[in-house]
Image: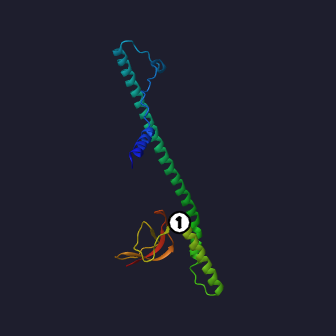
Amino acid sequence: MNEANTEAAEQLVEAEVVEPDVRPEVAPDPQSLGLELPTDPADAVDLLLRELETARSEADSYLDDLKRVAADFDNYRKRTRAEAEATLDRATEHVVVKLMPVLDSFDAALTGEPETESEKNMHSGMLNTRNQLLDALKGDGLEVIPAIGEAFDPEVHEPVSSPEGEGDLVVSQELRRGYRLNGKVLRAALVVLELN
């Protein structure tokens, strides 16, 4: 690069440099702030320091109030969310409880063995419908309580009779299905027990 180009580049760079505005900010007029400053500078400083302390105290009080309101709102939001979830859970439970007799009817209808072709078709259709209903309810948290072959659990199994003797009790027959909804037992399985 030759000297003429170097000088031209330097002039261009200097021309593009913008100096920041360094004018001092003009202080507001004390009277516009509602203050009358004494003529003695020391008294004026004392007055301004007292006003600053008062303003900071008020600001801290407002900040504390704002934090309290924010915490109250957060608690309100959490409470309303929990109440909405509880309402949804109760509504789901209500619907599932109303549908349990329908599931029982399907289970009872499906106990017999179909013999003719039309009975097989009917049996297959009912089985598919029951499975669709169970799958839809499983999406809302319904689960069938396992029974046959399971160790007896008084939390989820309701025995119709208990065999005499010593040993572990096992479910040998399920008379009525039991259901849980989101971990809560809606109805215990009605079962027959035997000794293992």
Q: Residue furthest bottom?
A: 116
Residue closer to the observer: 165 or 22: 22
Q: Is residue 165 above or below residue 87?
A: below
- Residue 92 visible in the picture: yes
Q: Which residue is mark 1?
A: 139
Residue closer to the observer: 99 or 30: 30
Crowding at dot 1, Cα within 10 Å, few <14 / some 14-19 / many 20+, comes out as few
Element type where label 1 sits in the image? loop
Residue 58: quadrant of the picture: top left
- How many numbered circles are shown? 1
Q: Is residue 30 above or below residue 112?
A: above
Q: Residue at x 58, y 78 (%)?
A: 110
Q: Quadrant of the C terminus?
A: bottom left
Q: Position of residue 81 (x, y in %)?
A: 50, 50
Q: Is residue 91 above or below residue 127?
A: above
Q: Residue at x 39, y 45 (%)?
A: 6
Name the amino acid type tagged 1.
Answer: Gly
Q: Position of residue 115 (x, y in %)?
A: 61, 87
- Residue 186 visible in the picture: no
Residue closer to the observer: 46 or 29: 29
Q: Position of residue 183 (x, y in %)?
A: 45, 63
Q: Residue at x 63, y 82 (%)?
A: 121
Q: Residue furthest top?
A: 39
Q: Position of residue 129 (x, y in %)?
A: 60, 74
Figure colour scheme: rainbow
Question: In the displayed structure, does residue 82 sit left or right of residue 54?
Answer: right
Q: Residue furthest right?
A: 118
Residue closer to the observer: 21 or 105: 21
